[in-house]
Image (tube, rainbow, N blue to C red):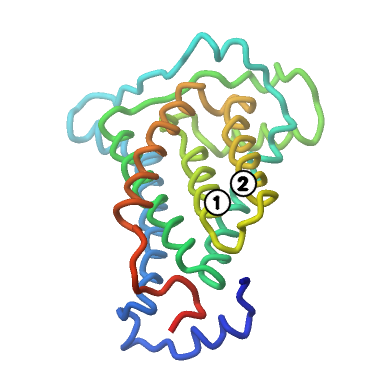
Amino acid sequence: MKLSLKQTIDYYRDIRPHNLTSDKYKHLFLLIYWPIYGLVFLTLEQLWPHIWEAITGNELVYHEVYCWIDAYIPLCELFVIPYYYWFVSLVGMVIYGLLFDIRAFRHFMWFIILSYSITAIIYVIWPNMQMLRPNMTDFPRDNWMTDIIKGLYGYDTNTNVCPSIHVLGAVAVGCAGWHSEHFRGWGWKLFFVISTILVSISTVFLRQHSIIDVIAAVVLCIVCYILVFFVICRPKKKGIDSPAAS
């Protein structure tokens, strides 16, 4: 049964500093991961090359990720829609989980924490990049969607691409939604499957990632799925699965 807003308000109205660490509210601490990861990713993107050079005296070498299949994947600006939907889906799952389904929130956050942390370690151990983007003057078409792509290329670097964070986040949302009791219908499940696939393939059709980045992310997602749903968040006989629980 879908929870009402009143049930959510009743659940959170007793929150106080002294009970934040209780079983009822400790899931909120998972939110701390977002600013931590933001700082880590910013460091990897902007500072790590300089830190590496200062420590070793050598320029950081990035390994190019490429597969022959990449040459046959065209730039398709229509995929900017699912690509940017990714940001909406991440925020949406956080808000939905916090307000209406803490169990789904835990599933989502632990999936993100595991997959993103492992990926950050990979970026440190094996710095990687892609050289798939077309020149700004070589776009096959000129419209508002290609303008968005050019803006994307302008602020997003072509380094730290394998595994794809976009794919990891999309699968995290999809798995949390698939297992949510509020989305039991097959229509919802089909929505999560299709949206996850569209977001994942958008990364290659926008020339943001190699197909290898996607495959690597899928493999990592399988590992994280097993750890999250069968180890970390395995079903318990007693527990708080929703804001209405007491």
Identify residue type, mark 2.
Phe
Q: Quadrant of residue 10?
A: bottom right
- For disc 1, the neighbor class at 10 Å (few under 14, some 14 to 19, many from 20) is many
- Residue nearer the viewer, 198 or 186: 186
Labelled disc at residue 178: 1
**Do residues under tags 2 and 1 come within 8 Å of each other at their CB atoms?**
yes
| Residue, disc 2 | 192
Labelled disc at residue 213: none
- The percent coordinates of residue 207 (x first, y second) are 59, 24
Name the residue at 51% across, 70% down.
98
- The percent coordinates of residue 144 (x first, y second) are 80, 36
- The percent coordinates of residue 168 (x first, y second) are 46, 41
Name the residue at 33% across, 86% down.
19
- For disc 2, the neighbor class at 10 Å (few under 14, some 14 to 19, many from 20) is many
- Residue nearer the viewer, 66 or 224: 224
Name the residue at 39% across, 45% down.
225
Q: Secondary structure at mark 2?
A: helix
Identify residue type, mark 1.
Trp
Q: Secondary structure at mark 1?
A: helix
Name the residue at 42% across, 87% down.
15
Image height check: is 167 above or below 172?
above
Left or right placement of residue 85 versus residue 25 in this view: right
Labels 2 and 1: the sequence-earlier one: 1
